[in-house]
Image (cartoon, rainbow, N blue to C red):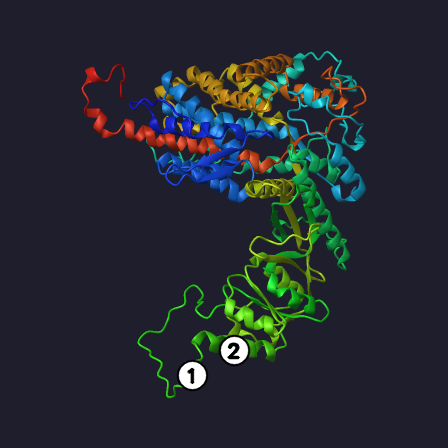
Amino acid sequence: MACRVMNKRRHIGLQQLSSFAQTGRTFLGPVKSSKFIIDEECHQSVFISSTVRLLESLDMTSAVGQLLNEAVQAQNSTYRTGATTLLFLAGAWSSAVEECLHLGVPISIIVSVMSEGLNSCCEEVLSLQVPVHDIFDHMDSMEAVSEFETVSVSLCPFLQDPSGASSIQEKHNLKDMAPHLSPHNLCGRPVKSLEFFKPQANIEATENTSQALKTSLRADTCFRKSVLIHSRHLNRTATSQWLQKPDRFLELCGDTTFQTYRCHDLVELATGLSHGDASSMKLVEEAVRLQHQSACMQPGNCVVPFVFDISRLFTFCLPGLPEALSCVCPGYITLVSTSSAAVVQELQSQPIRVILIQGDLTKSYRHLGFNKSTNIKTVLDSMDLQEDSSEEVWAKHVLQLLFQFSVNLVLVEGDVSEHLAEKCRHSNRLVVGSVNGRAIQALAEATGAVQVAYITQVNEDCVGSGISVTLWKNPLDAVDRSNRMAVLLKTEGINVITAVLASPVSAQMQTKEDRFWTCAYRVYHALKEEKVFLGGSAVEFLCLSHLHILAEQPLHKGDHACLGWLHDTSSWLASSLAVYRPTVLKCLASGWHKYLSVLLYNTATYSSELEASTFIQQHLQNAIDSGCPSSYILKEYNKLNSGIFNSDISNTVEHIPRVYDVLTPKIEAWRRALDLVLLVLQTDSEIITGSGHAQIKSQKLEGFLFL
C-alpha cells in the first residue's frame, strides 16, 4: 500500500481515503497492470487485476477502509463496472477537499459547491449520449467475427495514441459507424453547412453561441436528496426548491435526444464497449446472438422486442488450457465425476425425467427456519436395523422414490451425499450437485418440473421431462484436476447460454472471468437503457472543461443553485459563496484532470504523468477557447474517424471504431465517490469541531477560530 505521512491534527479520514485510492491507480483504463498481494503471516500470494479483488485482499479494518469497501462492493454488485473509477475519484476528490480546507473554505460551501458542480456535470454530459436502436436488425455473424479479429479499440477519442493507431493494418468496413451529422451544433445554433464539423475547418465561437452557452450553464442543476443531512455542517432547508424533483436527471435522460451519432449495429456496440478486451467481448457478443436466435425460434416471440437476459448467461472455467479454446455453447455446462461417464452415455439414448432440488441432498439437510423437535427419542423394538446405518436407510428410501417416478436425473443446487450418488450410479441414475440456482429455475420453466426443498416432497406433478444430458468434450478432451468431466444439459425452449473460459495460467482464471462479466454487464446496461456515452474519456474531459467554464461565470442573483445546502442564505456563508465558489469548482475539476492524466500515463503513451497532464491542459485550453467544449469533442471525434487527427495514421485506414461508455454505472460511480468523500468529511469535521475542542485555550489554536 502507498505510504503517506498523515497530519494528525487535520482530517485523517480524508488522508486515509486518498491513501487507499493510490493502490488502485494501475487498474485505471483498458491497459491494466496486475498485482500480487502477499500475506505477511502465511506468505501466500493472490494474483489480482481489478479494484474489487484488490480491496478483498487488503486489510480494510479501519472505519474509512470499511466505508470505501462497502461503496466499491455496492457499485460492483449492482453494475459490475465502474469500481475503479469510483476508487480513483474518491481519492482525487479527497485530496481536492483537503486543498479546499487548507485554503480556508468553509465546510458547508465545499459540500454545496461540489454537489452543485457534479450535478451540473451530470446534466452537461447528456449531450454526449448516443442512442442504441434496432441493432438486432443488422446482425451478421461472419462480419462480427472478422471485425473482432482486426479491430483495434482506441484508448481516448481526442487523446489518441499515434503508435497504437499505426498498428492497424487493414481497412475496416465501418461505414455505418461514420457520424451522421445534423446541421445543428451542440450549443443550439444552426450552421450553414457541415463544414463546421470537418477537421480542417477553423471553428470560431459567435456571440450567439456564447450566449447559448451562458444560458445553458445558468440552468438549474438537478439535485437529488443527499445522505448527509444529520450534521451541523451540512444542514439545509427541507423546503428547498431543488429537492422537489430529486430524479430530474433520469427524466432528462429520457427526454434528451442526440441527433449527431447513432449506433445501429451490435458489432459496433460490442467493439466500442470492449475497452481493449476484444476476446471477452467477442464471447459476449456471440452469447447475445445465440440468445436472440433462440428467442426468435420460439413461436410468437419475433414480434416482441428482444431483451438480453443476463440472468440466463453462465460461465464455465477451464484453467490450464489455451485461451483459444474459449467458446460459447447453448445450454448449461457443469461438472460430474468421471465415474459417471457410463451413466451419462446410457442416458444419452433414452428419455429423461428430472427432479430439481433446492438446497442440499443429504440426510442431515434442513432448510433455513427449520426447528428440530426437542425432547423426542427414537426407541427401536428390534435390533435388526442396526446393520444398516441411518444414512443407508435414507439412501434406500430416496432410491425407492426415484424408481417409483421413473426419474433418471436429479439436479441439486447444493451438496449431494456421496453415498447416495454412488448408489444412484449403480442403478443408471445421475445425481448432479452444485448446479446454479438460476439454471435450475430456467430448467424448471422449460421442463415443467417443480423445485422442492426435500426429495420426500416429490410427487408426479414435480417431475419434469424433455431434458437431454450429453458429455461435453473440449477440443483437447481434458479432464479436471479433481477427476471430473463436463456434461451439457439442454432442453427445447431453454434460453440458457454458457461461456466456456479457458486460460493457460490458472492464476489468471479469476481475472478472465471477472473481465468477461464486466463486458457482459456493459452490453446489458447499454441494451437496457438504449443509450451509451461517447467513450474514451470524452465525458470526463467535458466535465473538466465545463467546470473550468462554470468557475469563470459570475454568480448572479437567482442562480444560487447550491444555496439549498446552506441553512441560512443571509449568513456570512451565503455572502462568501461567490468568493469561494470558483476555488471549489477548480478543485473538483482537478479530480477529472488527475483521472485523465493517470489514464494516459497507464497506456505508456507518455513518459510521466506530468507530460500527460500538459497534453491534457493544451486540449483543455483549446476546448475553452472554442466556446463550446461539446462541439470541440465532436470535432476531435470526427478527426479520429477520418484518420487525419494524427499524421502517423496510415492513409489506408478509413475509420477507427468509436469507444462507448455505459450511462448509469458511470454516473453512479461519480455520485458514490463524491458521497463517500463528503461522508468522510462530515465525520472528520464532527470530530475536529466537537465540544472538547471548544475548551482549548486560544493560544493553542494557532490561528483557528471556531465560530
Report the amino acid beneath label 2. Lys
Kind of residue indicated by mark 1: Leu
Residue 309 seen from this side: yes
Q: Earlier in the sequence, mark 2 or mark 1?
A: 1
Give above or below for 240 relative to 631: below
Which of the two residues, 294 or 573, is positioned nearer the viewer here?
A: 294
Residue that badge 2 annotates:
396
Q: Position of residue 548 (x, y in %)?
A: 54, 17
Image depth: mark 2 or mark 1 in front: 1
Is 408 positioned to the left or the right of 223 in the image?
right
Q: Quadrant of residue 206?
A: top right
Above or below 100: residue 263: below
Vertical placement of residue 484 versus 65, above or below = below
Horizontal and vertical percent position of residue 639: 73, 20
Badge 1 element: helix
Question: Residue at left 80%, top 42%?
Answer: 142
Mark 2 residue crowding within 10 angstroms, few (<14) / some (14–19) / many (20+): some
Residue 343 x %, y %: 65, 68
Q: Which residue is mark 1?
A: 385
Q: Position of residue 204 (x, y in %)?
A: 69, 11
State whether residue 245 appears in this view.
no
Is 682 positioned to the left or the right of 561 in the image? left
Seen in the image, is 156 located left or right of residue 692? right
Q: Measure the C-alpha gap from mark 2 to mark 1.
A: 13 Å
